[in-house]
Amino acid sequence: MPWMECDRMSQREEFVLLARQDGAKVAELCRRFRISRKTGYKWIGRFGRAGRAALGDASRRPRRSPRRTAPEVEQAALAVRTAHPAWGGRKIRARLLALKAPRVPAASTITEILRRHDRLEEQASAQRGPMQRFERARPNDLWQMDFKGDFGLGDRTRCHPLTVLDDHSRYSIGVRACPDQQYRTVRDELEAMFRIHGLPREILSDNGSPWAVPHDQGAGLTRLTAWLLRLDVRISHGRPYHPQTQGKEERFHRTLKQELLRDQWFDDLAHAQRGFDPWRRMYNHERPHEALGLEVPASRYQPSVRAMPETLPPLEYGPEAERRAVNPVGQVRFQGRRVKASQAFAGECVGLRATACDGVFEILWARFVVGEADLRQAPRGAAASVRFRSLRSLQRTDADPVTDGTL
């Protein structure tokens, strides 16, 4: 099957850069990108011989010339600064080393070069201080997801940038130009990311729409979180009014603004996406990250082995549970009572499984126990008392842990 016409260049770049990672399984990546192995190896070979320029259908300006005579030290440092106005001495030095520039000076020397040429923002530099960092142990253990603040476009619509970041590697899974922040939009974008990068174990988001609702509305579940749980992807939310819970996403958004959005104007969503794609590639494969010891995020990332299924897994609850269809307002009828499940499950089936306490039943969704229904005090025809579990405390209906790994 040929490459998708939209984003063709970025699709080829994404495929080649993932395929060139140590231990990558090219055949599996070809399947996920929906191309033949012959096509996949063709683009890997072209990239290896001529770099990124060989991936396009028309000639493109190369990012660098390996045979070019090295410029003077100051001019080399200033050139990197010009290309990346938000980078400081440490990042510029790491980039020059990655480019194998001759006579690369110390980071402090580069900082002085920037200062002498009035290229250093002293106030912003002074505000930066040491941070205590936390991260998951492996790629795809946790992805962070959020919307960057929306902005206007030339066609008088607005762009809502959806960003997804791997917690362990800081690898940008996606930066997508969305027309809104609705369920269907987010699900479509996540499906596209899952097909290429596989399924994570967990996704962390804030408490906004479309991934969160008040806790008293069906365990805080939305259609999006119900869909993710059905894929065996846990969802968690940061503490309200504590954006530092998603500190990596907050920092990523600041970088996106400084390095791209602050000085760019886009005509429409397609134009914005054409700006996002090369910047994301640069962020993942070129930009040194201080939290990674000035390595690039791609050096620590591999796609998940948990592939996105072609169809949603069936809702199976086992012989010990009774299935009940959920009506449009999120209720089921069970033993003559009304049990409030969640509108997130409307049109689907939940399971109800007896507990050790007579008259108390677990409410099951996919492979998770989402709450308990207490029928003991409810007369027939009345609503049963329901207690939902928080998303962080959801228990699985089986004892098998989610297995994960990388390609």
Image (tube, helix red, strand yellow):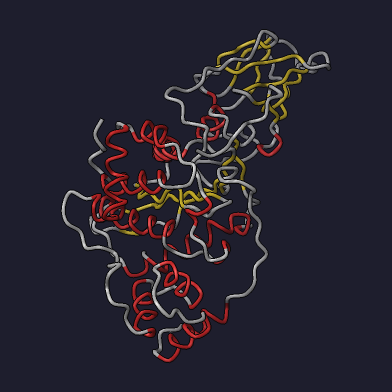
- For the point 63% across and 31% down, the residue is 402
Q: Position of residue 176 (x, y in %)?
A: 38, 49
Q: Position of residue 44 (x, y in %)?
A: 32, 45
- For the point 25% across and 49% down, the residue is 55
- For the point 38% across and 55% down, the residue is 281
Q: Nearer the viewer, residue 357 or 331?
A: 357
Q: Which residue is most to the bottom?
A: 116
Left/right placement of residue 97 relative to residue 14 reads: right
* Residue 258, quarter of picture: bottom left
Q: Is 266 located above or below residue 270 in the figure? A: below
Q: Is 187 located above or below residue 99 in the figure? A: above
Residue 183 in sight from this viewpoint: no
* Residue 33, quarter of picture: top left
Q: Is 258 located above or below residue 178 in the figure? A: below
Left/right placement of residue 59 relative to residue 23 reads: left
* Residue 354, quarter of picture: top right
- For the point 53% across and 80% down, the residue is 125
Q: Nearer the viewer, residue 237 or 48?
A: 48
Q: Position of residue 6 (x, y in %)?
A: 25, 43
Q: Position of residue 217 (x, y in %)?
A: 61, 34
